[in-house]
Amino acid sequence: MKLTTQVKAIADHMQNIQVFNGEDTLDMSRKSYESMAAQFGTKKEMVRVIEEFNIDNGGHSIPVRVYRPENSGTKNSSAIIYTHGGWFVAGSFETHDAIVRKLANATKSVVIFPEYRLAPEHPFPAGLDDCIYVTNWVYDNAATLKIDKNNIGIVGDSAGGALSVAIAGELGDILRFQVLIYPAGDNKLSTESWKTYANGPVLSLEGGVQAWEWYLQKEEDKQNPLAVPALIKDFKNTPPTLILLAGHDPLYDDGKILAESLRTSGVETEVVVYEEMIHGFMHMDSVLIEAKDAVEKISAFIISHID
């Protein structure tokens, strides 16, 4: 593993991020993620309006943010459902706020961001159920939301990529596009890239094993294709997909294998590899120009797949 000087400096800095009030390993993981997003991001872009409310799912309420971009509001907009990363156990409105703002402005799309339930308190399928419910709700309420229901797609990063794949498999007939950013694909963590990057940077094998155990607490869930994208045999309902990968990422092979499976199923699939990047680089736009380039490529892909 040979990192560029700039990326090595970032990786070294991340090793030194300390959480002083962490109650346990899980709490420290969540707070470290928030700290990383805050430290490496640039000043947040302005959007026209952010709405925050809860959607009642019968048994509980799902917190949702709706981001409306600058220069929007004159007609029904395209829409992005954003499923955030964090190993199914971390991540929040705040960890991804900067990324979501950029995507909203760059695509001129309304972004709907569910803060789905997290493991281990709420293991599979709780978070996925939340995301599927919100996606259906957005489609059913498109007119009220001033959204064009024929131009809705999904974007997911890391663990959110795994959620996105499952959502697309269930609801692909109402989705126009899918973007997966360094997606998690398999709970076995046995690929060559996992062997190479078992100790990071950013992700570790030990942390990955723990996260999947927290997420998949029943043995039968470990064999469920909705939980583990690597188990999916047919992606027939999946819309055109863009996959962004980082070269120095233990999830690199997950993404490559997923791309090949999508293509085998006949899904229009485009892959962009940032060879020098590490996992999570989309959060690091204050120091990495590749993060800006990734937003541009994602936006171009989305715009090319909407009317």
Image (tube, rainbow, N blue to C red):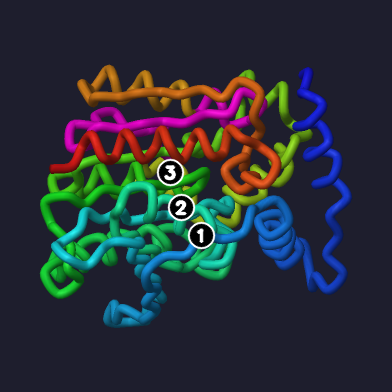
**Residue 178 image position (x, y, % from top left):** 31, 40
**Is residue 234 toward the left or the right of residue 226 in the image?**
left
**Residue 109 image position (x, y, % from top left):** 29, 55
**Is residue 205 toward the left or the right of residue 70 in the image?**
right
- Specify the amino acid type for callout 2: Lys
Residue at image position (34%, 60%) is 111
**Dot 3 surroundings within 10 Å: few (below 14), some, or many (20 or more)?**
many
**Element type at marker 3?**
helix
Rendered image: mark on residue 102: 2
**Residue 42 image position (x, y, % from top left):** 64, 53
Give the magenta range: 228-254
The answer to whether the residue labelled 2 contacts the one labelled 1, judged by CB atoms less than 8 Å apart, is yes
Q: Please say whether residue 64 is visible from this viewpoint.
A: no
| Closer-to-camera residue (305/186) | 305
Rendered image: mark on residue 45: 1
Quadrant housing residue 285: top right
**Element type at marker 2?**
helix
Residue at image position (61%, 23%) is 247
**Is residue 163 toward the left or the right of residue 279 in the image?**
left
Quadrant housing residue 137: bottom left
Quadrant housing residue 200: top right
- Specify the amino acid type for callout 3: Ala
Residue at image position (73%, 42%) is 206
